Image (spheres, rainbow, N blue to C red):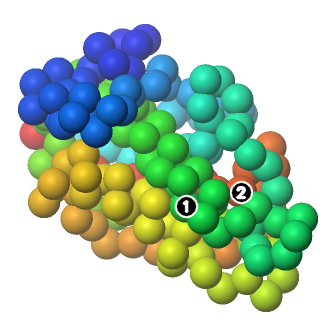
């Protein structure tokens, strides 16, 4: 599928509409990989960046300094990255209604020195998954602070999802 929205049919599509969200087109890889792979009943996404309309919504390190990406903005970026990850899942499954549950979320936060609020930033991804998928969006999670991410992105999110 080339259009992420086409893969959101049925119940999940209705929930996305209620939330005022649209699955974006699957982001093109920035290196030698694919956005998602299905193996049996699991879909593993590659790390998804917060692309909005084909461009990173922000760049820089997350922190509390005047030149840093604010934790609040970064939380919204994690939400955008999770929506991009759902688009990648939909692309390989054909329909987000095939999702049984989100098994694991890994969120990476490009962190300024001393920043320790990674869990609150990655909550943006976790909360979106719960809003869109309900109980199936409840998951295990890691929130990791890193020195830098691809293209200067403040956040990156990857999913492991069980599907029918």
Crowd around label 1: few <14 · some 14–19 · many ≥20 (10 Å): many
**Residue 67 appears in the figure:** yes
Give residue 63's position: percent from left, percent from top.
Answer: 76, 74
Residue 4: percent from the left, percent from the top? 38, 21
> Which callout, 2 or 1, points to the residue nearer the camera?
1
Is residue 157 found left or right of 114 in the rendered image?
left
Helix, strand or loop at label 2? It is: loop
Sooner in the amino-acid sequence: mark 2 or mark 1: 1
Q: How many marks?
A: 2
Which residue in the rendered view is the most extreme toward the right? 67
Q: Residue at x 31, y 72 (%)?
A: 140
Residue 111 vs 159, above or below: the answer is: below
* 64 horizontally vs 159: left or right: right
Q: Please tell me whether mark 1 sits on a helix, a strand or a loop.
A: helix
Q: Say above or below: 125 vs 122.
A: above
Locate residue 100, reporting x and y percent: 13, 48
Seen at 17% across and 21% down, the residue is 9
Q: Which residue is mark 2?
A: 154
Instruction: Calculate the distance from the C-alpha at mark 2 to the C-alpha at mark 1.
Output: 10 Å
Q: Is residue 57 above or below residue 131?
A: above
Determine crowd level at label 2: few under 14, some 14-19, many 20+ residues with C-alpha closer than 10 A: many
Q: Quadrant of residue 48?
A: top right
| Residue placed most toward the observer, 68 or 151 | 68
Q: Which residue is mark 1?
A: 75
In percent of the image, x 50 and y 66: which residue is there? Answer: 122
> Which quadrant does the C terminus fall into?
top left
x 62%, y 35%: residue: 51
Vertical side of 25 occupied by 82: above or below:
below
Q: Is residue 164 left or right of residue 96?
A: left
Q: Quadrant of residue 2?
A: top left
**Residue 117 located left or right of residue 140:** right
């Amino acid at each position: 599928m080339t259009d992420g929205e086409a893969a959101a049919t049925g119940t999940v599509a209705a929930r996305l509409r209620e939330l005022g969200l649209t699955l974006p087109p699957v982001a093109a890889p920035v290196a030698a990989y694919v956005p998602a792979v299905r193996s049996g009943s699991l879909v593993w996404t590659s790390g998804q960046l917060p692309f909005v309309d084909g461009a990173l919504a922000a760049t820089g390190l997350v922190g509390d300094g005047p030149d840093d990406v604010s934790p609040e903005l970064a939380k919204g970026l994690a939400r955008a990255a999770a929506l991009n990850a759902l688009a990648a899942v939909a692309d390989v499954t054909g329909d987000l209604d095939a999702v049984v549950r989100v098994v694991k979320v890994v969120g990476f936060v490009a962190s300024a020195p001393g920043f320790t609020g990674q869990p609150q930033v990655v909550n943006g991804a976790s909360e979106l998954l719960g809003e869109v998928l309900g109980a199936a969006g409840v998951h295990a999670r890691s929130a990791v602070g890193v020195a830098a991410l691809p293209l200067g992105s403040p956040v990156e999110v990857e999913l492991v999802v069980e599907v029918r």
